[in-house]
Amino acid sequence: MSSANTVKIDYVDGVRFRRGVVAAASKLIANSPHLDAINVFPVPDGDTGANMAGTMRSIVSSTGKSVERSIEKMTALIADSALDGAKGNSGAILAQFLCGFAEGVKDMPKLSPADFARAASVAAKRSCEAISEPKDGTILSVIRDWAAHLHANGDSYRDFHHLLSDSLEYARNSAKCTTEKLAELKAAGVVDAGAQGFVYLLEGIVDLLENGKIEKSFLPDARNSKSFANVQDKVAVESLDFRFCTEFLIKGSDIDRTAIRDSISDMGDSLIVAGTSGSVKIHIHTNDPDAVEAIVSGYGEVVKRKVDDMLVQHKRLLADDQTVGILTDSTCDIPDELLEEYDIRVVPMRLTIDDKDYIDRVTLTSGEFYKILPEAKRALSSQPTPGDMKRAYAKVSSDYEDVVSLHVAKVLSGTFQNALTVSSPFDNVSAIDSKMLTIGLGLPVMEAARAAQKGATAAEVRRVADRAVENVKIFVTIDCLDYAVRGGRLSKGQGMIAKALNIKPILQFAGEGHPKVVAKSFGVKRQESALIKLVRDNAYGRGNFKYAISHADTPETAEKFRRILKAEFGKEPEFVVEASPVLGLHSGPGACAVAFITDD
């Protein structure tokens, strides 16, 4: 309904268009928790609101200094910003919608209501073309219905409030109909989250026209996430056909979007290839992000990438008693099944092997790493990018009331300092320097995660984590001395002598996390005996002994230690796991670590 303050606008230029986009973004961002709560299709991973909000924030931020009055130039800027910042399925569709709208206003300085209606038709058409298998009952349905209504009535609209308020009602009705169009939505009793998100965008613009102030668009809608607290339970799943939500932004010239779509269409589902001839956003649900990247990189330079584990996201939504989230980095060695069970978030390190970049555990598994390491001329690890770290902290902070994070020793990596910097805007985060790596980090993380899952407060989880960090010890057997020499733990001369005499050292990461040689043995058998003695000497007489084993491509050594330690202490390890690449870079293939925690 029109209010007394309704602004009558008969044309839209670049400045007015951007103001409308800001108002739309404000409304959507304020109501993004509701969208997350009702997100059940195509995957019930609870992030549609966050993804759409992130996409809109990127647009508003990137175009904030622009005062471009040309509608053609402003929509082109907004479309580029949308492609650069698009997140998730709905974000990619929004980006393509805005690219199509920009195409529809080419050579125009400003728009009449009829011009807007025609551009919306182009935008809707391009949005549908970007999807490999468009489904009825999604955001596409609402976009298509809304644009068709505009097209049919475009010449009759008196002004933009008339156009938008009339078409908003049509979009609302279209969104309501999505419940009956998809079985997943009907089972959960909700509308499609992306469709409702598009409605929120339109509502934000109408609010602006009727109230004259964008601030009023920030008020959350009455439909909040609490009303839909049990939605995820209704659509709970144990597995997904395609587990990883994978996105790439590529840049180039004359990029063939159709060829990209055809080349990767059989590698997953929910495929969207959006953009222009010079900038393309690719979104796909797949089980092999690395293979997808290998193909799409042939069409242009990959400038952005993002991979989310949707099964972990879904399982997190089903656990509603836990208030403290746990975050670590990929130097932490814990089996995948435990990461999933306790919803431990992992921000990935970056690896460079012979000038090729990898994302640890995302585009390169530990097993793959150890296969290529022996032949590599140059292998380096680096801390997570600030963008990766920021996204990880933002996500876990939005999912839990509080966050406790534990990271690799700050003397070994800049990751902890990066974490402090990135997490400083979040008042619910407590970051800890573990002074460890691999399972020496994994055991304290598991202690914190168990406490969190039992409902402990943030302060209680922090105390558990701090105590575990103080009490954990780790010893590492070294088989190949070349890596110890490269890392400076042995000089070249020491390395040559040790190899000649078949001396096998044992490292301990102690104090602040510096590695030091604590034992040297002649041959592998004596080295293994020396490690068992170190564990025995440091653990006997202390209560609540827990231990874990990790190995750098030497499962037989790990199994031998498991048998001996079980016989010594009468209990199985918490877990046995292949070590992260960081241990391999420090200690080389064939290394094996035993870490343990005891009471004070």
Image (cartoon, rainbow, N blue to C red):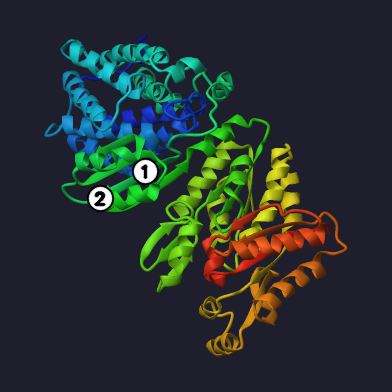
Q: Quick one: 283 or 110, which is closer to the camera? A: 283
Q: Where is residue 382 in the image (x, y as percent from the top left)?
A: 48, 63
The residue to which callout 2 is attached is 251
Q: In which quarter of the image is residue 210?
A: top left
Q: Which residue is drawn at 66% across and 74% down?
A: 507
Residue in the foreground of this view, choosing between 333 and 414: 333
Q: Residues within 10 Å of mark 2 (few under 14, many from 20)?
A: many
- Few, some or many residues within 10 Å of mark 1 (<14, 14–19, 20+): many
Image quadrant for the N terminus? top left
Mark 1, residue position = 247
- What kind of element bears circle 1? strand
543 versus 39 height, above or below: below
Which amino acid lies under the numbered mark 1 shown in the image of this protein?
A: Glu
488 or 240: nearer the eye? 240
Q: Distance between the residues labelled 2 and 1?
A: 14 Å
Location of residue 577 in the rendering, given as x and y in whole percent from the top left corner: 61, 56
For the residue labelled by badge 2, is the local secondary structure a helix, a strand or a loop? strand
